[in-house]
Amino acid sequence: MTAKKRPAPPPLELREACILAAWEVIAERGIEQLSLREVARKLGVSHQAPYKHYPTRDHLLSEVMRRCLQGFAAFLDARPRHHDPEQDLESLGLQYLTYAREHPLEYRLMFSSPWPESADPQELAGDAVHAYDVLRGVLRRMHGESPGVQEKVELDALCIWSMVHGLAGVLNGQCVDRLGLKPLVLQRAVAHAMTRMRAGLAAEL
Amino acid sequence: MTAKKRPAPPPLELREACILAAWEVIAERGIEQLSLREVARKLGVSHQAPYKHYPTRDHLLSEVMRRCLQGFAAFLDARPRHHDPEQDLESLGLQYLTYAREHPLEYRLMFSSPWPESADPQELAGDAVHAYDVLRGVLRRMHGESPGVQEKVELDALCIWSMVHGLAGVLNGQCVDRLGLKPLVLQRAVAHAMTRMRAGLAAEL
């Protein structure tokens, strides 16, 4: 006996429901298993229903990722602020690491999963740039706004992003737990890396 | 009509064939889909056959990961060597990034996937420690062997691993391509990060 289809909810509600259902599919079965058919099955609506709002699976995935990127940028914006840009940069790094630890699925979706190819590339890129601009903004306060230092801002932004992304991956990964490191070393890893990075950033190039 | 079972190959051959088949399952369908049943299906042998060599799926996964870790450590050992430890550290970093770029699946398996829980934890950990010791060895040449600096060695090892792991993740990921960064910035990202890291490591703590 096949399951009875529920009547489709009103359009706006279905549009939002698809996003929540997509999120559940990704969380339970991995991003590879996301399809509009699977979303329809989870919602108990007809196979056709999600297509009214999302022409392809990538359009839906794009919307899920936009929500992630917007939430991530808002989380970074909500860090404890400091007038001193060096202190603010450290606060931003800690906030980034907190996000990665507390939202591992969102974090993996944004930074370790294939991005949707076809759908709304401009809008998605815009949200990614907005999140990245939080970091560039702090570095501009540190290095200045003059055109001559913008390449340094860009290179340092990539460097700092890589450092915190790497800390998140190493400390939240499972390999590090097998190395027999002392608890004190693990506890001090972030503060130590930030000290090294601060000294590195202060160096004349 | 069900597929005819091939006669099981001789024991040693089957033991190796399981590893190759497991690798194919992981590459094609993701680590979550790895099971001894799936490996048996791929090899065209009876469901029971792989159990002769691997009591559980985690024992097989453990063997696959050991091969990865050993190959990774050998790759790091094969870097261009330098007498000067600072230069050697840079060579190690570049070799690490080359491995991550050229072996993305192995890299993800070691550092971004759940490790097997039950099987041979000591042997697997030993291989992980061996790979990590390549990095600690270079840092001991830099900082010295005296007990007083071993905590610095450990903290710097975690810091440098995080930096190169982060560079690998950012530069091989898909997010960075959507940020509209200039090609020159991307080309110089690794050299710049290494310059910052070298300056950071040289600082007195």
Image (spheres, coloured by chain):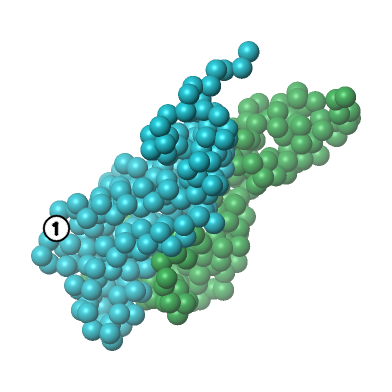
Chain colours: A green, B cyan
- The reply to whether residue A176 is visible in this rendering is no
Eyeballing the image, is A89 above or below B149? above
How would you rate the neighbour count of disc 1 (Cα within 10 Å): few for under 14, some for 14-19, many for 20 or more? few
Residue at point 30%, 48% (across, down): B71
Occupied quadrant, residue A175: bottom left
Occupied quadrant, residue B148: bottom left
Residue furthest to the bottom in view is B148
Q: Chain of mark 1?
A: B
Q: Amino acid at mark 1?
A: Arg
Residue at point 44%, 54% (across, down): B111
Q: Disc 1 marks which residue? A: B81
The answer to which of B100 and A102 lies nearer the viewer is B100
* Quarter the C terminus of chain B occupies: bottom left
- The reply to whether residue B48 is visible in this rendering is yes
Total label count?
A: 1
Residue B116, image x, y percentages: 52, 53
Residue B86, image x, y percentages: 18, 67
A130 left or right, relative to B64: right
A3 left or right, relative to B85: right
Residue furthest to the top in view is B1
B27 left or right, relative to B138: right
Occupied quadrant, residue A85: bottom left
The answer to which of A147 and A133 lies nearer the viewer is A133
The answer to which of A181 and B17 lies nearer the viewer is B17
Eyeballing the image, is A111 above or below A48? below
Residue A149, image x, y percentages: 30, 60
Residue at point 41%, 72% (across, down): A181
- Helix, strand or loop at label 1? It is loop
B103 left or right, relative to B42: left
